[in-house]
Amino acid sequence: MESEQNPVHIEAIESVDHLGIVAGTFHKLGLAQIIDRAIPKTGQHRISNSQILLALVLNGLGFTERRLYLFPDYCQHLDLGRLIGPNITADHINESVIGRLLDQIHAYGPTKLFTDLVTQMFTVYTEVIQLGHVDTTNFSVHGEYDNESGDGCIKITKGHPKDKRWDLNRFVLSLVVNQHGIPIFARARDGNESDKETLLETIQSLT
């Protein structure tokens, strides 16, 4: 009877798990100032663009394929204060601020931003690049996409699926990594581009 009259309230446990290593590396490399200088915050929301992008990285490495509108649910049980910044809550990382950030990244240039971050990374890890390995992969996506908008975006369309999902549209990612497997160049491409052309263009873009 005592337990019914005095119920025990258990507070939700916030976790860090392996994401602490990811966030710690992000901060150690000094990536936040590069991101915020390239794509400064334009809205009235509380969180900075570098903090939103860090949250996206944590989501990608911690719980893949979580839809953007479910992002606050994903963050609900994470210790965001330790991972991202003080006084940051799950409600701050919603689909509105994420969508605005993605629009800004598109305007700035995803490959250019990636190159900026790689350049910053090698000011901390100063090891010489001895070789580069070039390869492509492709990703299946659901939904309908307007490939005739003329806005310079890649075409998400049917291609040659490496996951055997012939029924889905896709896009291609070309990637170059160094001798340790660390990415040093990345570019998204149309879903139906062939490796023969993509690999050669990727190599040429590095020269």
Image (cartoon, rainbow, N blue to C red):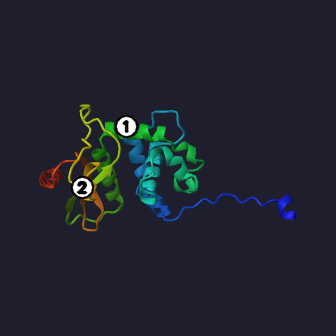
The residues bearing labels 2 and 1 have C-alpha atoms spaced at a distance of: 27 Å
Amino acid type indicated by mark 2: Pro
Residue lying farthest front? 167
Horizontal side of 5 relative to 126 (left or right) equals right
Amino acid type indicated by mark 1: Asp
Foreground pick, 2 / 47:
2
Q: Position of residue 113 (x, y in %)?
A: 32, 46
| CB under 8 Å between discs 2 and 1 | no
How many callouts does the rendering have?
Answer: 2
- Density class for disc 1 (Cα within 10 Å; few <14, some 14-19, many ≥20) is few
Q: Is residue 97 above or below residue 13?
A: above
Foreground pick, 122 / 53:
53
Q: Earlier in the sequence, mark 2 or mark 1?
A: 1
Instruction: Residue under label 2, please give it.
Output: 161
Q: Indicate the quadrant containing the N terminus: top left, top right, bottom left or bottom right.
A: bottom right
Q: Position of residue 37 (x, y in %)?
A: 39, 41
Which of the 4 image quarters holds residue 148?
top left
Residue lying farthest bottom? 180
Say what secondary structure mark 2 lies in: loop
Horizontal side of 86 relative to 159 (left or right) equals right
Foreground pick, 128 / 193:
193
Which of the 4 image quarters holds residue 195?
bottom left
Q: Position of residue 9 (x, y in %)?
A: 75, 58
The reply to whether residue 53 is in sight is yes
- Density class for disc 2 (Cα within 10 Å; few <14, some 14-19, many ≥20) is many
For the point 20% across and 53% down, the residue is 160
- In the rendered structure, find residue 103 and report the number of the disc placed on it: 1
- In the rendered structure, find residue 10 and report the number of the disc placed on it: none
* Front disc: 2 or 1: 2
Horizontal side of 180 relative to 33 (left or right) equals left
